[in-house]
Image (tube, rainbow, N blue to C red):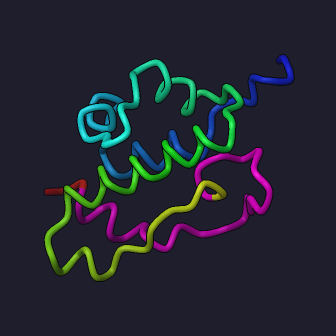
Amino acid sequence: MSERDLGTQPLDGLMEAWGVTNNDVVETSPEQLTHKQVRRARTGRQLTLKMMMKVTRTFNVTIWHRMDDGQKTRFVEYGHKNLFNYTKGFDPEAVDPNINLAAEVKGK
């Protein structure tokens, strides 16, 4: 494994938990993300901070559009330290505060 390829990222598991595909993220993106950028983010290609923030914002927007008003009040937005294991402040033991909400939204 090279220095820039860091393995599957937490983003990948969160996208699966929420039932979000790469295409969903690209279509929802207010920042013009491409399929290639999303794929790289999921598979562990090291991204710049600017790109990590772009992916994080778009992931949160994608989820936001899937929820009703009641669910939106319970949603805790993800930060880049929740999505990428090579960022400062990443905690591998952290529990996702949205785990039940993700199952609820995915089950719709």
Query: What residue sits 40% from the left and 43% below the top?
Result: 16
44 left or right, relative to 74: right
95 left or right, relative to 31: right
48 vs 83: above or below: above
The magenta stretch spans residue 103? yes
The image position of residue 1, as x and y in percent, is 83, 18
The image position of residue 30, as x and y in percent, is 31, 43
| Image quadrant where residue 75 sits | bottom left
Query: What residue sits 69% from the left and 36% below the top?
Result: 48
Furthest-right residue in this view? 3
Specify start and end residues of the magenta stretch as a single range: 82-105
The image position of residue 17, as x and y in percent, is 39, 51
The magenta stretch spans residue 33? no
28 left or right, relative to 79: left
Classify the position of the C terminus by image quarter. bottom left
Q: How many marks?
A: 0
4 left or right, relative to 29: right
